[in-house]
Image: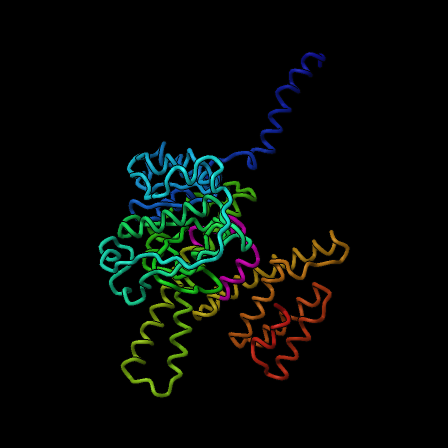
Amino acid sequence: MPVVAQGGLALVLVPGIMGAVNWKDHSRAGNYVAPDSAYNLLNSCAPNAILFTNGDNDTFPLWYLQEVEGVRTDVRIVNLSLLNTDWYIDQLKNQKVNDSDPLPISLPYEQYMGERNAFSIFPTQVVEVPVNKDDLVRNGVVKEENLHLVESPMLWEIKSRNNQYLLKQDLLIKDIILTNAQQGWKRPIYFAITIPQSSYVNLMDYFQLEGLAYRVVPIKSKGSQYSAGRTDREIMKENLLKKFRFRGLNDPSVFNDSNIKRMVGNFRSNFFRLAMSYIEEIEQLEKELQNPKIDFKRKSEIEDIIIKNRKEAKEVLDYGRKVITDEAVPTESYNLAINARAYMKIGEEKSAEDLIQLAKKRAFDSFTYDKIRYKGQIDPESLDMYACQLIMRTYTEAKKYDKLKAFASELSMVTGDPQYQRYVNQFLSNQNSIDSALKELE
């Protein structure tokens, strides 16, 4: 074949081969995670809301949906990174954007212009946020049946950063919340769940989880190990199961890189948090049932609630696995393990065991890889190890001691560390409490 012809053939074949081999991990066909994350975040908010976001990656998809597709133009986005600049504060304070009126900012320009108050010495202090219960009900902040939970006034302890100072953005958050409260809590205020805790200005006890955002409400709650504040199960379930979009996350042909998988982790976490909210109430009610003096009517009420909550929790967990499949977006071992524990707590043993076996495989494969890569070393604080500890706790809580013992034996064999089998054997021989038996593993 002539050299020219060979060159021409190479010019055609080489790009063609490269395209064929690399097409899947370069194609974004069917990948809607970025716009759907923004869509779900916007639709986590009540009408006319103020939504604080962290930075560019949070904010730009939201602006795209609002400006290009006209989605939820009533929500006002407040980018915390830009909230340290005077020109941006001026826009928020003075300009109507789409269907959103200017924000309730009372701070005069002189207090935020230029570098003024970029860093402010601010000792920790308690701020009284005004609360009128009639306003709360009228503006949909709190349901009437929850008025007895309201703290009036709301005693917000603002903690300075490093016990020294506040940033300009913190001062603006304080001003917006106080001014909005003085105006009758007219506008719902939300923080995206992706914001770092340092930027929550110690509002966590007044958070109400409703989706991909926390709403600020004057109801104090310490929350749980799974979520800050309280959870409005009715709103969150409506959002997750009816409003939110999860396009392409059950399609194995769609390519998802590591960044997408992290974003999907927020979706999966929300299904778990909602399910655990039902389960936590079940556990509280089961303690109440142990009271020998409980009357028949209350006992019957509790049993009905427990049955209902188990059904609700299962529906949420099942739906999450349906719209975001492991085949399309592989699940990390610890996420599998926490969901297995949730299933076990509501008596869904088959679903729990299926997830445990998958979590075990993922974790053990990771340990085997780490031993090769790091010359026999395994990180005892890795998420994979955390998953294994959760599996052991799940079997212990469910009193499945044979499975616990078998799993501990396998874990000791894979890691080369006999401590897991030794702790389990100690527990089984002495019948220690769950906490004391597994304390050293955590």
> Residue 374, percent across and down?
74, 53
Q: Quadrant of the N terminus?
A: top right
Which residue ends up furthest to the bottom in the rendered image?
292
Q: Is residue 96 above or below residue 330?
A: above
- Image quarter for residue 367? bottom right
Look at the image and tell me whether residue 188 can be seen.
yes
Read off the magenta span. Answer: 321-341
Look at the image and tell me whether residue 273 can be seen.
no
Left or right position of 80 against 406:
left
| Residue situated in front as seen by the camera: 46 or 29 | 46
Q: Residue at x 34, y 48 (%)?
A: 45
- Image quarter for residue 406? bottom right
| Residue situated in front as seen by the camera: 132 or 274 | 132
- Does the magenta-highlighted stretch encompass residue 332? yes
Q: Is residue 75 above or below residue 441?
A: above
Which residue ends up furthest to the right in the rendered image?
375
Left or right position of 15 against 231:
right
Q: Quadrant of the C terminus?
A: bottom right
- Does the magenta-highlighted stretch encompass residue 331? yes
| Residue situated in front as seen by the camera: 408 or 50 | 50
Left or right position of 147 against 78:
left
Q: How is the protein colored in the picture?
A: rainbow
> Residue 2, percent across and down?
71, 12
- Image quarter for residue 379? bottom right
> Residue 55, percent across and down?
48, 41
Q: Residue at x 46, y 52 (%)?
A: 200
> Residue 308, percent across and down?
33, 68
Q: Residue at x 55, y 75 (%)?
A: 400
